[in-house]
Image (cartoon, rainbow, N blue to C red):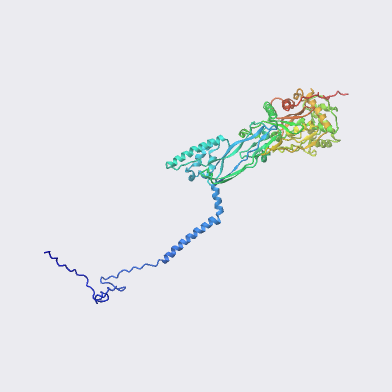
Amino acid sequence: MPPKEPPRRRVPGPPRPRNGANGRSGARPPARRPRPAPGRTTARGRAPRTLRLGSPRPRLRLVSLGLTLIMLLFVARLLQVQAVDGTAYAAKAEKNRYLEYTVAAERGEITDRRGVALATSVDAHTITADPKLFTPEESKAPDAPQQAAALLAPILGKDVDELVKKLSAPKSRYTVLAYRQTPQVWKQIKDLKAVFAEKAAEDKLNGGAGANVLAGVLQEPTTKRVYPNGDLAAGILGFVSADGKGGGGIESQLDKELAGEDGKIRYAQSGGRRVPTAGGSEVPAVPGSDIELTIDRDIQWAAQKAISDQVEKSKADRGYVIVQNTRTGELLAMANAPGYDPNDLSQATSASLGNAALQDVYEPGSTSKVMSMAAVLEEKAATPGTHVTVPNRLHRGDRLFKDDVDHPTWYLTLNGVLAKSSNIGTILATGQLGKTQAESNQVLYSYLRKFGLGTKTGLGYPGESPGLLAHPKDWSTSQQYTIPFGQGLSLNAVQAASVYSTIANGGVRIAPTLVRGTKGADGRFTAADAPEENRVVSEKTAKTLAAMLESVVDDQEGTGTKAAIPGYRVAGKTGTANRVDPVRGVYKGYTASFAGFAPADDPQITVYCAIQNPTKGSYFGGQICGPIYKQVMEFALKTLQTPPSGSKPPRLPVSFKPGE
């Protein structure tokens, strides 16, 4: 029999409701325990804590208002940046991002009359820097300006402190460290930059700052002025200053034509390097015009060597030689000594700078007598054969006049007065120009002016002096008698040469010229304007004077025999004048000179030489300037292939016998 299951225990459960609402019984569910009223205590004696949440709306409104105000501030700032100040900020951004520099135009050449370069330009580099790239933030080095300056100073030949000052200007984005440096200088700097850039890259890979103190050093391509012949014609050419402007001579006078028009390049940069894809603009430079001078390089060399040697030999202050084409007025040479090398102005002295042949004024002495004789002949006051009795002394006004040498009474012709360079004879001859001394003074003055004294030559050369020639009413008592033989008035060397070229050109003065023309960037040559011409004396007077001047050189009694040139007829005149000391303003020393032209029978070339204050050896013009005249004239005649004279000089009489 299977075992009986034990009786199941009945687990008491909650009493089932009786039949009621649920349909099973009528018993009601037990009533809920009522909550104690507020303020009342429970059976344990404490009132339960009641938690109430505040309304979130006020706080949400406050947060929304704050966010709205912040957004309004952002909107206002954006409006200010983009709408109100947008242009200014954009310009500032471009300024910081874009660099703009000038591309210097290639300066035109200066050549001689044959096209030989006297001044030219070669490629160079202007070394610049961006100071902002030398700040600690950009360079990653606290002393970048000092380090860079120490590296660059020996290469650029600049002072370290000067470079530090230029590199320590963070508000600037551009500064020039050195103008017009050679390609070799820039190569040295570029090599240094490459080394420092490589070190900076390695340092950065190793976790360092990657400092580079030369990243901000840049360059601009430009040109540098060079003078291939050194000091040759430096007084004419002048020089170019560090900023590329003409500093003297033709370089200054024609700076606008030579300089051309600079161009501009603008590009974006980052870290001192150009960003090729960021765009940019470029205005190309227009090269300057070439200037062709009337100067002949070879004749200029001969003149400069001759005067330099004699100035050194005579221990003189300075000297000049002028060579002029008598028929055109063109200056073939204008030499000064001492000179200077425009390639290296650091070695030049203040006395050697400039062009003394045009800037120095001095009393010409006896070379001026040719103008007095021209006036006498033109006014028909005398002829070459007129007798002039010349005493040892002549009393005029408040002075007692004499000649360079003591002599017994000379019996000279007017030709002889010029040949022997007699001061007394010249005073006597010019005294015949008018009925009174005042009238004679006025007539002589008019001729001096027509020969170009007291006015500039017409070259337009910077710093040229017109000389000094007072009006006759202002002549002192002694000046009335000294001016006829070249004391009491002053001129420059080119004016003196022009006087003799006027006689050689048949009495017609042609204003001296130094520029033949210009050649533009298109290769077209434009000739200079024709020089001004005016007749001073008649052709007859000019030919007579030329014959008289031959006596100075050809006749044994003349003072210029050392200027004679075999095969050529030479006309010339010596001069030895008391010299005014430019510092003390008193007469001290002498001015020795010689002027003339050749061939006398067919004049083509004028040569004038003057030496200031020779202190060693002779100081007479015929002795120290006559040989220079001969040397330079001989060279010029051969260079220009001038044929020898085809006739003999007239040999006018120099003296006469009393009673004849």
**Closest to the observer, 446 or 3:** 3
Which quarter of the image is occupied by the N terminus?
Answer: bottom left
Can residue 279 be spotted in the picture? yes
Q: Quadrant of residue 639?
A: top right
Above or below for 655 versus 265: above
Can residue 399 be spotted in the picture? no
Residue at 54% x, 55% y: name it.
82
> Which percent across, then down, holds residue 573?
77, 28
Residue positioned most to the front: 1
| Apparent side of residue 588 relative to residue 379 in the rendered image (left or right) | left
Residue positioned most to the right: 659
Q: Quadrant of residue 487?
A: top right
Looking at the rendered structure, the number of numbered marks drawn on it comes to 0
> Which percent across, then down, holds residue 414?
83, 28
> Which percent across, then down, holds residue 491?
74, 35
Residue positioned most to the left: 1
Q: Quadrant of residue 220?
A: top right
> Which percent across, then down, holds residue 635?
72, 26
| Apparent side of residue 484 relative to residue 97 in the rendered image (left or right) | right
| Apparent side of residue 398 relative to residue 316 in the rendered image (left or right) | right
Above or below for 97 versus 634: below
Which quarter of the image is occupied by the C terminus?
Answer: top right
